[in-house]
């Protein structure tokens, strides 16, 4: 039997650190703004990083070795206490600090601490990870040592590929991240669109390539082929339709291996004949039977509105006086954000909906049967900078409208079109996106607690809406301008072909 006394051991080592007896290492952090002292033997046996650093540093005349680091003093203080005492206190610290601490632990090759913080973020900080998804994703693949976070993020992207592929800085995506996505069988995107994005990414890595493809030389194609050599084998060529092969693949056939191109051509004419190239399975989001693709299975339409509601909204978009039937709705309502799944932080809205035009925001109000919403024909834009007393940018459009839908004890739907088009849609500035969500005139989602469901701060000016034609809510003794929500969804409206 073993008797273990780790608590006392930890306490003694922390005391050793605080008393600084026999310290022979100085660590400079934050550009020499603060100095820490430590013992070389403890650093070496707790971290391979410090072992390698100390072996390559010559001591000064007092036999002191100095290590320089760019991490903050606050983070390094925690790192040092972990090295000595094995204790990390995460009480009353922000999630971003925990994330930065994880990066620092990884830098110092403290695998135990790195893995523990990575698991902590996934298990307890899912909403924050989704809110700052782009930052998280690029950082972990740049470091390439956070497999659990990589899998967590890739699981999200397979269901919401627009988070990365339609992001404005897609071109700067690390190659390792792109390859990791291309390997996923469950990536919910048509294969030909995946091909388009891979080509776009490859060309963006070589800005000197001619804009006009007809002007490309043999060397230009070779440059693109070399850039994409790790990506091209991961495309599911044999699950792309004949027409798409002709339209999309043929213009770039020179970047494909000769045997692969020969097999693709053979497959176009004789799909039942065996080929020498490896045929990767169809992605689960676009299950195919060679040579034609089958229909993509539909996700649940909505947790808030019905098809009857979608037909009614479609008629408002087209300015019809009568409502479409559910069988002839001319638009697809593509769900791009669901509060229950993606979180209710205001920043999440701007991260996911940036760049999307022709969207409908649907809101389920807490404590009533109200379903409120608005239509924005313009693109949501999260790029505006904050300046003095300017919290964002108003967008001018005559096509937007807000509404209340018939539901429960709500007898009739209400449509309210914009009357002051200069103040139809508001894009919040970056500094305000942690509080403001989508806004239509004096109707918007807002939260001081970074969660639209918590603090009853969402707003509609019942008696003072000078921007839209008619009120979509009626003030009563129990109904005020402010409200909380149960859930909200954002749909991209796409006309059916």
Image (cartoon, helix red, strand yellow):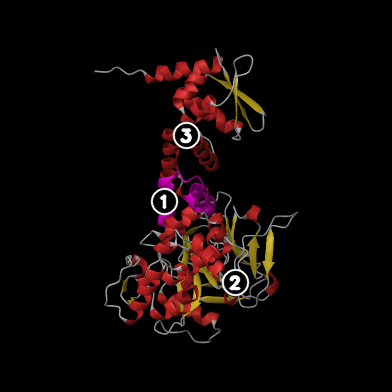
Is residue 218 placed above or below 13 in the rendered structure? below
The local secondary structure at tag 2 comes to loop
Q: Nearer the viewer, mark 1 or mark 2?
A: 1
Q: Main secondary structure of the magenta part?
A: helix
Q: Residue furthest right?
A: 388
Q: Which residues are magenta?
A: 127-156
Q: Quadrant of residue 70?
A: top right
How many numbered marks have been drawn onto this rendered protein structure? Answer: 3
Q: Position of residue 5 (x, y in %)?
A: 36, 17
Q: Circle 2 is placed at which residue position?
A: 471
Is residue 345 placed above or below 460 in the rendered structure? above
Q: Circle 3 is placed at which residue position?
A: 109
Q: Are marks 1 and 2 in contact (CB under 8 Å)?
A: no
Q: Position of residue 489 (x, y in %)?
A: 48, 64
Q: Nearer the viewer, mark 1 or mark 3?
A: 3
Q: Position of residue 288 (x, y in %)?
A: 32, 73
Q: Residue furthest bottom?
A: 321
Nearest the eye: 384 or 70: 70
**Mark 1 or mark 3, which has the lower sequence index?**
3
Residue 130, magenta (yes or no): yes
Q: Circle 1 is placed at which residue position?
A: 152
């Amino acid at each position: 039997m073993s008797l273990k006394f780790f608590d006392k051991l930890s306490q003694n080592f922390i005391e050793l650190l605080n008393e600084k007896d026999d310290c022979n290492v100085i660590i400079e952090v934050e550009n020499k703004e603060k100095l820490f002292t430590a013992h070389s033997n403890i650093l070496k046996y707790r971290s391979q990083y410090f072992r390698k650093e100390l072996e390559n540093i010559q001591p000064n005349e007092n036999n002191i070795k100095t290590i320089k680091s760019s991490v903050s003093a606050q983070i390094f203080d925690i790192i040092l206490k972990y090295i000595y005492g094995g204790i990390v206190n995460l009480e009353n610290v922000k999630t971003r600090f925990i994330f930065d601490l994880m990066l620092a632990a990884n830098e110092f090759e403290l695998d135990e601490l790195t893995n523990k913080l990575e698991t902590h973020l996934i298990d307890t900080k899912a909403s924050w990870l989704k809110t700052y998804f782009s930052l998280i994703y690029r950082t972990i693949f740049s470091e390439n040592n956070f497999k659990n976070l990589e899998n967590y993020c890739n699981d999200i992207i397979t269901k919401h590929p627009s988070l990365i592929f339609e992001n404005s800085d897609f071109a700067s995506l690390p190659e390792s991240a792109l390859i990791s996505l291309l390997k996923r069988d469950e990536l919910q995107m048509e294969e030909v669109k995946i091909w388009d994005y891979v080509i776009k990414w490859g060309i963006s890595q070589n800005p000197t390539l001619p804009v006009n493809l007809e002007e490309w030389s043999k060397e230009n194609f070779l440059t693109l082929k070399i850039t994409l050599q790790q990506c091209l084998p991961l495309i599911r060529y044999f699950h792309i339709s004949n027409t798409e092969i002709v339209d999309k693949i043929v213009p770039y056939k020179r970047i494909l291996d000769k045997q692969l191109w020969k097999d693709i051509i053979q497959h176009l004419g004789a799909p039942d004949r065996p080929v020498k190239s490896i045929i990767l399975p169809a992605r689960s989001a676009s299950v195919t039977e060679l040579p034609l693709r089958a229909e993509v299975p539909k996700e649940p339409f909505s947790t808030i509105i019905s098809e009857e509601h979608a037909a009614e909204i479609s008629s408002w978009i087209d300015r019809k006086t009568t409502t479409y039937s559910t069988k002839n709705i001319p638009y697809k309502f593509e769900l791009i954000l669901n509060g229950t799944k993606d979180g209710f932080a205001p920043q999440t809205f701007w991260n996911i909906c940036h760049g999307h035009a022709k969207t409908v925001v649907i809101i389920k109000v807490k404590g009533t049967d109200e379903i409120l919403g608005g239509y924005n024909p313009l693109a949501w834009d999260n790029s505006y900078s904050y300046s003095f007393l300017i919290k964002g940018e108003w967008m001018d459009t005559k096509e937007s409208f807000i509404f209340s839908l018939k539901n429960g004890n709500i007898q009739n739907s209400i449509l309210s079109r914009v009357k002051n088009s200069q103040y139809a849609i508001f894009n919040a500035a970056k500094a305000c996106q942690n509080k403001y969500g989508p806004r239509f005139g004096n109707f918007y989602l807002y939260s001081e607690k970074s969660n639209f469901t918590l603090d009853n701060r969402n707003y509609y000016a019942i008696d003072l809406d000078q921007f839209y034609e008619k009120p979509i809510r009626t003030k009563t003794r129990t109904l005020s301008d402010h409200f909380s929500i149960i859930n909200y969804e954002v749909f991209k409206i796409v006309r059916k072909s």
